Image (tube, grey):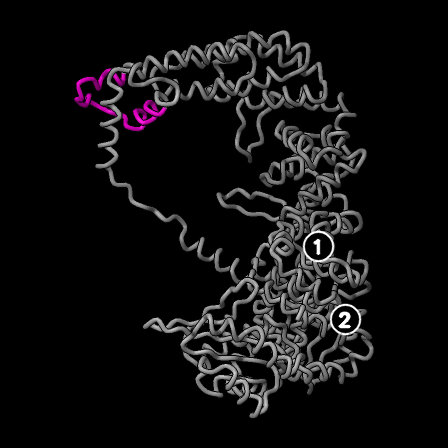
Amino acid sequence: MDSFELGRLTDFDFEAVCHDLFEEILNVRLELFSPGADDGVDLRHYTAVGGKLVIQCKHWIRSGRSALKRHMRDVELVKIDSLAPDRYILVTSAELTKKFKDDLFQLLKPHVAEPGDIYGLHDIEAELRKRPELVRKHLRLWLSSTAVLQALLNKSVLVRSGFLREELEESLRVYAPSKGFHTAQELLESYGVCIIAGPPGVGKTILAKVLSAAYVANGYEIVEVSSDVEELFQSWDEDVPQVFYYDDFLGQTTLEDKLHKNEASRLVAAMRKVSRSPNKRFILTTREYILVQARQRYEVLSRHDLELHKCVLDLAEYSKLIRAEILYNHIYHSVLDPAEKANFARPAVYRPIVNHRLFNPRLVAHSIQIAKVGEASEGIAQAVLGNLNDPQRIWGHMVEYDLDDSALHVLEMLFSFGGSTALADLEIAWSAYRCELGQVDDARRFRRAVDILENTMIRTSAPFGEIQVFFHNPSVRDFMVGYIGRQAKVIEHIIASVEYYEQIVNIWTVANGRAGSQLFDRIARLPSVLEQAILRTFESEPSPGRPHASWSTRAGATLAIASAFNLERIGELMQSHLRDEEWIWNVDDHEEIASLANAVHKCTLSSVIEIRDSVIEQACQHICNSVHDWATARRAMGILAQIGGGASEVYISQVESERREYMEAEFASWVGGDEPGYVDWSNLDEMIDEADFHFNPEGDFPGFTEAREALAVHRENTTVPEVDINVQEREDVSRDDRVVDHLMGLLRQQSR
């Protein structure tokens, strides 16, 4: 690990190296301080007796000594005086002569105890050479060194690849280390082969390149396999350590791209050959669904245990700090003007990107790469957000060109279930959909389709024994909403094939939302198809793999759908159910009764309007009949308030009168100051608040004053322990946010 180069580090990399280095040198824990704009502190430590150590890191390798001295004199010195640390250490990547270090020492006295507390480039390098494990920990410190890059350039096999050296260098600059690196490295060291799989844009290729460079740094020759695996055999040198790099080894989109002739057999042979050779490594990348397709189609791949070699990258595992470092690295190394880079230090600019629920490294990189020199950072940030908001950019090509119909139909059916359901229910719906389309619906085809999609666009789990299926992440669901909305016939076939009423409700929920306007318009053109689907499924058994919706919930949703699309036949169906007064006794929960009554109130269909008043009257009366004390009266008031129409106002007034009677009785029991038998202090507290707010309590309610005094005494005698919920979680989040703010804040230095 003698080969490393501080000049290729970002400001954040340099600070991170200094943090770990000086923790070892000083044998203390250092706090990474988040200073906002900059108040002279990068690293800090408080001693047991309250002494304060401050370390400032200045990555000024390009700016030079003179600029550093001016900056320390004109900007930093006043901050250091204000901080008044017990010990101050300056660490800089600038080269310092002995005379220059002495001059800085004179400038920074008395805060700097001795010239030895000023570390220049050669001092840092000398300390790092004593600590090879620390150097190894910081990938970019040694992977980006000139020696490694020169080794890449010298390999004859790279000449054929054209841009690989430049691509590797770029990858090393922008890569943000994650646990995927260590997982992949462990696979390579254990088995010699690693298949990096995952969805589009997650960072498979960049990880493969960084791993390749890591092996070059350890004396390996890199061989890029660009066409087919035969290149690996042709380049094989038994006596030379070699790492073979094969990007998209199964094709960028489909198997037909690369698996021709006996390529599958040759791939397996290559993996086995590498696994038996201690001086060889084989790094491959592919999309997860293509890997599953390959195993299904080629028996030789299905027999070989590819799972043994697989490292799956998942965007959900990218912490906020990793996301921030990805953004920071791309901004730091971009062609943007220094002032525009510095603008990305503003929380209003970077936080919406880092916190975006659909964060995708490829889209972040692409948006910044195409930014124009001189373009305002706000415009670039908006472009990044625009790309992240449009999942078409991530999933469009795969769905349009890569997936076969059976896999696409799985996605379309999962959409109809709202993005999650039991695997068994999904298969039933998928089969019905395939029949509607006149296509084969055998179980084996369904299982293959699920396998292809798993870990890419869907995921499965069995928390309670039954397998559940979900969209892999929110971007897949968002994409499917837009995709189905754009397809003229797809939603018609989905609705025509539904097996469960819940599918209709889920489709309606999406169409009625802000993102579903296009889908709503499509459905509005299909009244007869929708009517038939509702008539067929309204009284059907619910989906076994989902929570059962009550009859009233189903009826309320049906009224909303029928009203939105003017489905008079459905209105007549609901009229027939609700005209029978027995319906209310089939509903156990009063809130559900109110919800259904409110749906009737809002419905615009003539057949439902005919029964509106009677349904609302019946619902309100049923709710009022349940009132028998203060608590039930309070609940009835809240439920009645949910129901529209004049009838509910009448019943609300009735319950209010009953509530006053309960208050009068309760306060009267306190006349004389004696505590009545059992006291519900919570109810009493509510009554006192109610009386204070709406009445003249002392005049209207005898015993009110005594009741209030008794409540005050009760509160004094009752100790309520303070409970700090999720302290550790809040601290972890706070620390992550603090480091992110510090990291992005370093971009301000770009404007110097």
Magenta stretch bounds: 666-689
Question: Quadrant of residue 285 in the image?
Answer: bottom right
Residue 667 shown in magenta: yes
- The secondary element bearing badge 1 is classed as helix
Q: Label 1: which residue?
A: 378
Return the residue nearer the eye: 172 or 395: 172
Quadrant for the N terminus in the image = bottom right
In percent of width and height, residue 80 lies at 49, 73
Q: Label 2: which residue?
A: 229
Residue 280 visible from this viewpoint? no
Can you say whether 715 is above or below 572 in the image? below
Dot 2 or dot 1: first in sequence order is 2
Can you say whether 60 is above or below 100 in the image? above
Quadrant for the C terminus in the image = bottom right
In percent of width and height, residue 280 lies at 66, 79
In percent of width and height, residue 502 lies at 61, 29
Residue at 43%, 80% (x, y): give it. Answer: 26
Can you say whether 462 is above or below 540 in the image? below
Task: Using the numbered discs, state the Cα–Cα distance from disc 2 to disc 1 in whole angstroms.
Answer: 46 Å
Return the residue nearer the eye: 507 or 294: 507
Question: Quadrant of residue 36 in the image?
Answer: bottom right
Q: Amino acid at mark 2?
A: Val
